[in-house]
Structures are given as C-alpha cells and as structure tokens.
Amino acid sequence: MTAVLPGGNSTFVPSHEASGSLVIDYARNIKKFAVNQYTQVKKVDKSIFYYMKMNFDENGRIIDASNLDNEWQDGEAAPGGRTNGKEFEYLAGTTRRYVYPFTLGDKAVAQATWDIVASHAAAQAQRAMTARTMLALKSVLTTGNHLSSHVIDISSVSGNTGTWAASTSNRQDIKRSLNYARDTIIQDSLGAIDADDLNLVINPTLARQLSECQEIVEYIKGSPDALAQIKGELSGGNQNAMFGLPQKLYGVNLIVEKTVRVTSKKRATSAKSYVLPTATPFMTVRPGSLEAPFGGPNFSAITGFMYEEMSTETKKDKDNRRTSGRVVEDYVYILTSQEGAVMFQNAV
C-alpha cells in the first residue's frame, strides 16, 4: 500500500456495515408465483398413484328432444337404468423428486455480514418454484395432452382477421377468441363451469402488447370497473395494473405469468426469458382454493400431485467445516381435465 496523509476517505477501512449491511437481491416470494392461481395441488402419500377420470357425458344425455326416452306411463313397469351407468377409468401418475442444493464453508458463514444461509435457501426455493412453474406449463402447452378441438389457432377462429397485438375495436379478435374458447369449455364441461373459474394466462410481453392495442384501449375506456382498477381506485388491489390491464378481460380472470428463467451458465453472458411463450396464452379452469378437495368430483384443468413440497433442510458438516443446504420437492403436474383447458396458438 502507498502511504497517504489523513483525509476524508483514508482514515477508515471500508466495510459492508457502512451501508447498514444493505443487500441488493431480487429473491422472489414463493407464495406470489402465479402458478398457484391457475393450478390446484393434491397431496399424495405414494409416489406412484392412480386418479379416476369419469366420462360425464351421461350427466347430460337426453337424446330425444321431447324426452320420450325417459317417460314413464302409468301402469307400466318402470324403465330400467342399467345402460345409464357412467363409464370411468383409472389413470396413472408418477411423481419425480427434485433437489436444489447449496454448500457454504464455515468461514464464509461466520464472517458474512448478512444471513448468508437464509439468502441461499431463498434463492434455491425460487429456483424450485421456477422449475415447478415450467413443469406446470409443460402439461398445458403440450398439444398432445389436449382434446384436438381445444388447441385453437387464433387465425382459425371464424371472423378473426389477425393477431391479438394488432386487434382493433372493430376487429375484436381478442374478444372473439376468448368467447370461442369459453364456449368450447362450457360445452365440453356440460355447463359446469362458473365465470369465476376461468382464467386467461398470458406472459408480460403479451400483456404489454394487449394494453397497447386499440381493442383493449377502447375496452378499458368503456368499462368503468376496468378503468378504475388500472387507476387504483378500487379496493383489493390489482396486480395487473402494472401492465395497464384490469383483473378481468371480457369476464375472464386475467393472470400475467411473469416467472423468468435464466438459461445461461454461471459467469456466461446472462440470458433470461419468460417461461411462458408470448404466442401461446391459454385458458384454464381452476375452481375453488389452491388445494383440491378430498374425494368427490374435481374439474381443475391442471393438477399438481404433491408427494413432498418445498422441504428446506440444512446440515452442519463438522468434519469438513461446512454447511450444506437444499430444497427438495417431489411432484408431477398433469392436465387432468382436458375439457377445462384451451391452448391458443399464434396469438402474436
């Protein structure tokens, strides 16, 4: 070191404490991941399991418009119901275990001026939720998982003349697409879907493009509730306000899936992307709470079968003078109700 005279910047040793131990980080609260809004989870006690899928056409089967097939004339034997049994099948599922580990030396832990173990655990928990989101999306973005009529190319919708991003109030390509998808789900679910059960899931890039397109600008102008939500004038908050969008779009809950994946290796040029592609938004049914009810019917489109969920563990290794930590999950996401999901293609 070079000897210096006393001065304003030379009479102390710079330290982290001088900034109040300020830590700049972007660790995300795992409870705020959007995947919890459009999927349901179901606890399983074995990693290999079966779930039952009912053929519910029988629920609405009335073949004769005059209902003569079900008429019971006085004095006649009551019609038998043997042929009215509901068909069902057992479908198999298998969970997979994932681990997100970290290791810290004892000297690093002892000398750190922040809670370095908790910081690393939070980072791995975010990695776990990012992976969980990706696997949930894979279940709904795999065309082979859907009924063929539930994979909808925007250009194939009757009356559409272009993409969502370029739609106008005269064209109404967005409204027409959502109405078509909603009708498809309602018809194939025999009308069992309520308005609050339906969610449209888009990524932030598409959210920005929608907020700037003329159709949605005019929609917001003409909807007092939507305009008030964006201005923050209604109680309860609106997470979509940051994108210039309301909570509902044409009566469908709007969810912006903003999970980001880093695809570059450590110390390489950083590469980031949204896990949900811009051109493939989707509509899905998620009734009730996050956790699926025990027994009974359930028609959430995407179900996460959880054998182990977000286990966080740390271990002090005295022999090697280090602390090991990990986040462990064991699950599988399945598109359990194909009738309750629609995948859009070529939205932009």
Image (cartoon, rainbow, N blue to C red):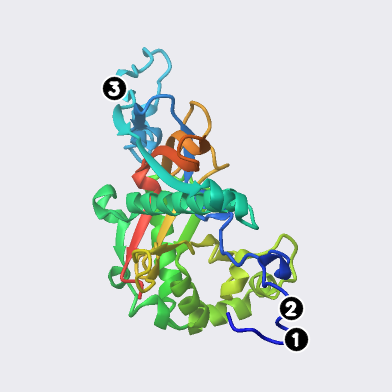
Look at label 2 and name its amino acid. Answer: Thr
The residue indicated by pointer 3 is 83
Position of residue 151 relative to residue 187, above or below, is below
Q: Is disc 2 placed on a helix, strand or loop? A: loop
Q: Position of residue 45 (x, y in %)?
A: 43, 24
The residue indicated by pointer 2 is 11
Position of residue 38 relative to residue 53, above or below, is below
Position of residue 258 relative to residue 348, above or below, is above
Residue at 49% x, 77% y: name it: 208
Disc 1 from disc 3: Cα separation: 96 Å
The residue indicated by pointer 1 is 7
Q: Is residue 179 left or right of residue 25?
A: left
Q: Position of residue 312 (x, y in %)?
A: 52, 39
Say whether residue 196 is visible.
no
Say whether residue 77 is visible.
yes
Look at label 3 and name its amino acid. Answer: Thr
The first of marks 1 and 3 along the sequence is 1
